[in-house]
Image (cartoon, rainbow, N blue to C red):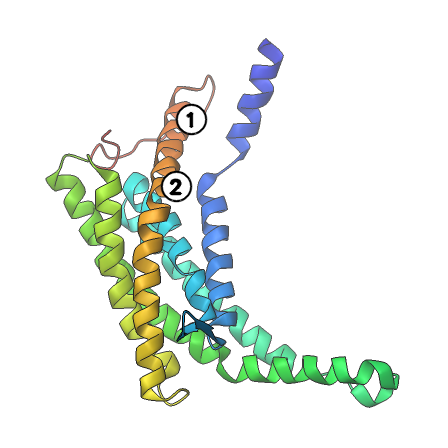
Amino acid sequence: MKRLQDLAGRALACIDPIVILSFLILISAIASNLTSYKVIQVFGTEASLGTFTMPIILMLLNPIAEVYGKQRSNQILFATCLAEILFAASFTALSLSQRDCSLLPLAERGHCEALNQSYVLISEHIVRGSISFAIGCLIGSQFNTRFLLYLKSLWSSRLYFVRDIFSSVIGEVVYTAICFMIAFYGVFPFATIVKIFAFSLVFKFSSTVALSWISQLIVQALYRYQAWIETAPGGRKVKFSSRYLQV
């Protein structure tokens, strides 16, 4: 049993939850950008396919701000936006080197041409989409994080579930308004943009409520991880401000 505990302790010491959460945030941002210009019909109205992955970002980002503070949250956010723009630029560069479909057998040419066309369509807007995401997310998340931590100090760190919902709603409204106008203006008719915007807000509000309990579980897991790191024999000691570690 002692050996198993030691092995479990070493495994936990090698796991950095910040790295895992940052990776998931980046994957969600990339997936949202790649699918943001794909418009689908949902309940008779237009919707951007990228809308369905965006609520995941705040679900993962809010626990970081709650436990580690605004500075760490901003660092991850800046890094995510930069990595997302670099990915978009790399994708665009790779899309220029398309396969020569004429060299393939006739049965495979149709699939090859369709794949080349999809790369072209995505690359036409992916850099613009990543920039709009970065601007919207940086501004929207500032509103979100500041309001989350303000309510935390106001309510003595209680009611995370309520604080998460309120702050996420504010952040999503600001983000969606900025991002959609930069990304979609001139690409879709204004009426379509309004429909996409309306559906996006309704979906994000609903998703925020549905995902908030997961966000709360992540907060609890991060607190427990920090408590384990600080009390583990031979573990590294980490000092955090009591402002961010209130229970």
SS for callout 2: helix
Query: Disc 1 vs disc 2: which is toward the camera?
Result: 2
Q: Residues within 10 Å of mark 1 (few under 14, many from 20)?
A: some
Q: Quarter of the image containing the C terminus? A: top left
Instruction: Inspect this view and state whether residue 96 appears.
Output: no
The residue at the point 33 percent across, 38 percent down is 216
Instruction: Inspect this view and state whether residue 76 appears.
Output: yes
The residue at the point 32 percent across, 85 percent down is 191
The residue at the point 38 percent across, 79 percent down is 183
Quadrant hosting residue 237: top left
Q: Quarter of the image containing the N terminus? A: top right
The residue at the point 29 percent across, 59 percent down is 141
Type of the residue with mark 1: Ile
Establish if 47 lies above or below 77.
Answer: below
- Find disc 2 in the rendering and name its residue: 214
Quadrant hosting residue 136: bottom left
- Find disc 1 in the rendering and name its residue: 229
Type of the residue with mark 2: Ile
SS for callout 1: helix
Relative to 146, 64 lies left or right = right
Establish if 23 lies above or below 224.
Answer: below
